[in-house]
């Protein structure tokens, strides 16, 4: 096996902040290396250093070497590097007349120009298993880096909706990626773009090519992004959280596609992720990073079976699991809140919620699970009277929200606490967290000793009364979410609505916040609607679960029943698509899924 | 189609409201145009005659209606041998200047248009170029110098810049003419030569605004994910800047540009005054000075029409520049 891209003692600093320190690992042909870590661990920064795409304030040291390309690819780079180095218009013009197979016979020149460019920064290559003369990427000249970006290293980013330029078509943006490296006549370009889109499993590629980004779904955009990333047949693919923004069923498809590229093209893939399930599903080797340093690197099987480092163990332990004991619903008959035949339609054609009936019994956590666009957040909003309800009834604490007067509505709202997904956006940055927590108390004149109440709330979310004077930016994401929770329970709500409360948090923080929510629920006994896309998270906190699909509840029942023996095909699909953090089990599940097709 | 008709309906409504308000406010004002042309000595009889001749003896609403119908059918003032014809589109008749308002505007508009369009092109080019350089070189001395200069330019009053320009380039250096206007059709070179200084004065101030706007917008866009994508595919920095950076700043720039140009087409009062150019702005100022109500009403309506038209043009351009605009209109929510 040969190293394609080798990171050797790579350190990245921003001013005095060290984002990555002495990171060493190498990518091999036909293997997926997962770079795992929580936010701020330096995994993305390390990867971007290979492309020279860090902000100017970053200082990079160490060595990142890219093995010399095979004959075809090196010719393409040579053309690109040569043309840009000499900045001669005629060179690129003649090249474009030549078509795709540009630099036949210019191979020698090509190697020469890369050597020239890299000679300044690197001593002649003596690196062990790197083939030929590797190119040093740190401090490489701009033309060399440009030839590498997209040409030898393709990149896929996390958020497919913002990674595309909204004003150009998908086809134009992919074509641009090709012509940046291989001058290609228009007709060939079109064929090439369509072939790439077909290869990534997109139906109707010509429609996709004509579309603007806003007309496609996240999954389609991410497939097209992969098509663009492999357009110049790169040796390395950097996938930075490629499925984090996607639904699980869509994620499964993208992971399968990446696996296929690895197997058929022998692409070396650098997979950056925080999701241990994704790692177990796709990775061959794993590098675990924490606070900018590599704490462990090992092949995937031994890493999961017997992690050598305590941090790896804790990371694995924090992942919510789809096995193990579940909560049993309390024997309760009284319903605190609920919706009956609820429909929320936008215009004539969009049925966000379509005839949903759901009860939230006292003292019970009801998990509402569904993919994006399934209507789960709309139901949450309807329960606070913030959704334009088309028909049906919404009842909270005995009050029909649609018939209630303003005054009654206000009173009911004081009985509802809400926790949103992004704690950074849910807190006023100019208020101390004490003031934020005190706001509902003051608004509803609910406490005589506001200070004392805020202090005891901060205590109950384990932040300490002394932190009342701090501002949100002084806190971590997990701490901010604790503040939001404290504010939500300030008025002793009858109902707590938690809308994806841990999706923006790291897995270890998520575990703490979930435990906190469960404790508070037991202590105060409020009913809770817990909205999430993550079945494992739902499993960890919910007594009952309702599965939502396209605005309809397809299955509802006790968590144990629904998740261990799902009766609806959609629930089954959802469960099958969520990767489990166990490489062997995951492989077996994949085989099973393939067999069932 | 419904979108276009809605848009047109809105435009007409705005024009109606503005015309009505101007009409009511100005006619109800203490200045009486009839008094100006009733001759001396102005006996009550003569004044009443003058009123009836000009149409001011009718009730306010009736006057407004005849004003509106006049736009489409033309009007005749008086019925005797001294009757005055005002052909459609009639925006009123200036008894002081002895000419229909439409004719006055048509006479003066080329001056204002030459001034406005030339200056607009100049400031757009200057402003966007300066803003782009500032954004690309952000934090450098060049950036800071350009931004400091733009604050100075923004805060400088047009008449002051104009007068200083006149003093230096017109009188002291004697490089350009100090006043007047030569029609384009007469001599394109003299036309440009007379306009160059006013263009520069107008452009300098607005270019500063556009430089700041471009800089902020471009910096925002350059921080977007898709710019990182563009770089990650190996595009040259110039291409990244043009196709992915500047292309996405066009919508806000076009919005500002349309409105600025639209309001300038109704008359650049200060600049026309400083350079003694016979444009709409000068005409309006004279009209105010002489309580020439029909002219004031006519020009106000004309300026409003220009702004409304510019607005509509901007809206149409949005659809072209940002595919999301047109698709949302046609999409599931309509």
Image (cartoon, rainbow, N blue to C red):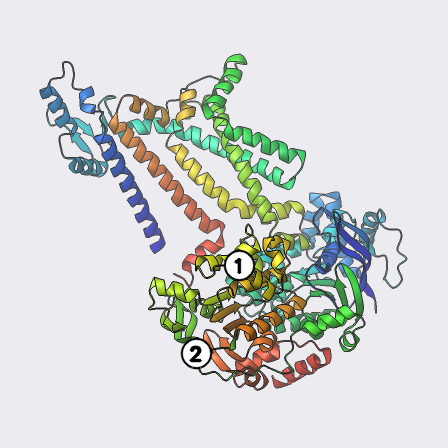
Q: From this viewpoint, is residue A276 visible?
A: yes
| Front residue of this view, candidates B306 and A525 | A525
Marks 1 and 2 on same chain? yes
Please tell me how crowded label 1 is: few (under 14), some (14-19), or many (20+) other residues with Cα within 10 Å. many
Q: Is residue B145 left or right of residue A331?
A: right
* Residue A252, image x, y percentages: 62, 74
* Residue B132, image x, y percentages: 59, 39
**Contact check, label 1 and label 2, Cβ < 8 Å:** no
Chain bearing mark 2? A
Q: Earlier in the sequence, mark 1 or mark 2?
A: 2
Q: Is residue A323 left or right of residue B69?
A: right
- Residue B49 in the image: above or below residue A187: above
Check disc 2 and report the residue beneath it.
A335
- Quarter of the image holding residue B133? top right
- Quarter of the image holding residue B181? top left
The residue at 26%/37% (across/down) is B21
- Residue B191 in the image: above or below residue A530: above
* Residue A389, image x, y percentages: 38, 68
The residue at 69%/66% (across/down) is A273
The residue at 62%/46% (across/down) is B241
Instruction: Classify the position of the C terminus of chain B by image quarter.
Output: bottom left
Check disc 1 and report the residue beneath it.
A437
* Residue B160, image x, y percentages: 48, 22
Q: CA distance from mark 1 to mark 2?
A: 28 Å
| Front residue of this view, candidates A446 and A171 | A446
Residue A354 numbered tag: none
Q: Secondary structure at mark 2?
A: strand
| Front residue of this view, candidates A234 and B276 | B276
Q: From this viewpoint, is residue A185 visible?
A: no
Please tell me how crowded label 2 is: few (under 14), some (14-19), or many (20+) other residues with Cα within 10 Å. some
Chain bearing mark 1? A
């Amino acid at each position: 096996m040969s190293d394609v891209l080798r990171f050797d003692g790579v350190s990245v600093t921003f001013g005095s902040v060290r984002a990555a320190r002495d990171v060493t690992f190498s990518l091999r042909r036909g293997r997926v290396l997962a770079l795992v870590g929580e936010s701020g661990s330096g995994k993305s920064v390390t990867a971007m250093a290979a492309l020279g795409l860090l902000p100017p304030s970053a200082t990079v040291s160490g060595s990142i070497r890219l093995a010399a390309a095979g004959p075809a690819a090196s010719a393409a780079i040579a053309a690109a590097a040569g043309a840009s180095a000499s900045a001669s218009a005629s060179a690129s013009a003649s090249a474009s007349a030549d078509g795709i197979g540009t630099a036949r016979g210019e191979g020698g020149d090509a190697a020469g120009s890369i050597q020239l460019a890299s000679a300044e920064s690197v001593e002649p290559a003596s690196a062990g298993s790197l083939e030929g003369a590797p190119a040093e990427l740190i401090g490489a000249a701009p033309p060399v880096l440009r030839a590498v970006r997209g040409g030898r290293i393709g990149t896929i980013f996390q958020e497919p909706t913002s990674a595309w330029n909204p004003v150009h078509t998908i086809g134009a943006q992919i074509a641009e990626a090709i012509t940046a490296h291989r001058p290609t006549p228009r007709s060939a370009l079109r064929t090439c773009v369509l072939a790439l889109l077909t290869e990534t499993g997109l139906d109707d590629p010509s429609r996709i090519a004509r579309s603007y980004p806003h007309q496609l779904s996240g999954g389609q955009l991410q497939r097209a992004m992969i098509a663009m990333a492999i357009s110049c047949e790169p040796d390395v693919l950097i996938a930075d959280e490629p499925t984090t923004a996607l639904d699980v069923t869509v994620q499964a498809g993208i992971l399968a596609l990446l696996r296929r590229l690895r197997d058929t093209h022998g692409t070396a893939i650098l997979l950056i992720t925080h999701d241990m399930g994704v790692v177990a599903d796709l990775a061959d080797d794993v590098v675990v990073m924490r606070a900018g340093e590599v704490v462990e690197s090992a092949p995937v099987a031994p890493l999961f079976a017997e992690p050598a480092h305590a941090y790896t163990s804790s990371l694995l332990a924090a992942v919510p699991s789809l096995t193990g004991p579940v909560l049993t619903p309390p024997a309760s008959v009284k319903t605190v809140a609920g919706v009956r035949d609820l429909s929320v339609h936008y215009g004539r054609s969009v049925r966000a919620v379509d005839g949903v009936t759901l009860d939230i019994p006292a003292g019970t956590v009801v998990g509402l699970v569904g993919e994006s666009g399934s209507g789960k957040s709309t139901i949450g909003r309807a329960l606070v009277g913030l959704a334009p309800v088309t028909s049906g009834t919404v009842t909270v604490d005995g009050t029909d929200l649609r018939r209630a007067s303003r005054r009654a509505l206000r009173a009911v709202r004081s009985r509802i606490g809400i926790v949103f997904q992004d704690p950074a956006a849910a807190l006023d940055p100019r208020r101390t967290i004490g003031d934020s927590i005190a706001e509902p108390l003051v608004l509803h004149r609910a406490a005589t000793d506001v200070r004392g109440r805020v202090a005891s709330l901060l205590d109950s979310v384990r932040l300490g009364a002394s932190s009342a004077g701090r501002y949100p930016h002084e806190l971590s994401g997990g701490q901010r979410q604790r503040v939001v929770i404290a504010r939500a329970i300030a008025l002793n709500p009858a109902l707590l609505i938690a809308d994806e409360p841990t999706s923006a948090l790291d897995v270890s923080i998520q575990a703490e916040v979930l435990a906190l929510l469960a404790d508070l629920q037991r202590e105060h006994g409020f009913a809770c609607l817990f909205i999430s896309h993550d079945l494992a998270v739902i499993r960890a906190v919910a007594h009952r679960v309702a599965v939502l699909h396209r605005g309809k509840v397809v299955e509802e029942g006790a968590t144990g029943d629904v998740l261990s023996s799902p009766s609806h095909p959609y629930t089954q699909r959802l469960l099958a698509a969520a990767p489990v953090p166990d490489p062997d089990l995951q492989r077996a599940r994949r085989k099973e899924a393939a067999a069932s097709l | 189609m419904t979108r276009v008709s809605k848009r047109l309906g809105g435009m007409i409504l705005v024009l109606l409201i503005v015309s009505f308000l101007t009409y009511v406010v100005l006619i109800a004002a203490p200045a009486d145009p009839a008094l100006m042309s009733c001759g001396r000595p102005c006996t009550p009889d003569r004044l009443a005659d003058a009123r009836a001749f000009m149409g001011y003896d009718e009730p306010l609403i009736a006057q407004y209606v005849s004003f509106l119908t006049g736009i489409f059918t033309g009007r005749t003032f008086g019925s005797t041998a001294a009757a005055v014809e005002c052909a459609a589109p009639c925006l009123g008749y200036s008894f002081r200047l002895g000419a229909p308002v439409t004719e006055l505007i048509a006479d003066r508009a080329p001056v204002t248009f030459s001034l406005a369009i030339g200056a607009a092109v100049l400031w757009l080019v200057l402003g966007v170029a300066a803003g782009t350089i500032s954004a690309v070189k952000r934090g450098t001395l060049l950036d800071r110098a350009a931004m400091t200069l733009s604050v100075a330019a923004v805060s400088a009053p047009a008449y002051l810049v104009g007068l200083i320009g006149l003093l230096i380039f017109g009188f002291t250096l004697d490089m350009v003419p100090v006043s007047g206007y030569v029609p384009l059709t007469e001599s394109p070179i003299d036309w440009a030569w007379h306009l160059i200084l006013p263009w520069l004065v107008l452009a300098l101030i607005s270019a500063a605004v556009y430089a700041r706007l471009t800089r902020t917008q471009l910096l925002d866009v350059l921080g977007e994910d898709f710019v990182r994508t563009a770089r990650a595919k190996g595009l040259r920095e110039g291409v990244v800047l043009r196709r992915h950076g500047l292309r996405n700043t066009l919508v806000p720039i076009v919005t500002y540009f349309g409105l600025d140009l639209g309001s300038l087409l109704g008359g650049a009062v200060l600049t026309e005054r400083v350079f003694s150019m016979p444009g709409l702005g000068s005409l309006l100022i004279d009209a105010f000075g002489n309580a020439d109500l029909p002219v004031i009403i006519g020009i106000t309506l004309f300026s409003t029409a220009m702004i409304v038209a510019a607005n509509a043009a901007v809206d149409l351009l949005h659809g072209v520049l940002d595919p999301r605009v047109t698709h949302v209109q046609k999409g599931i929510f309509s």
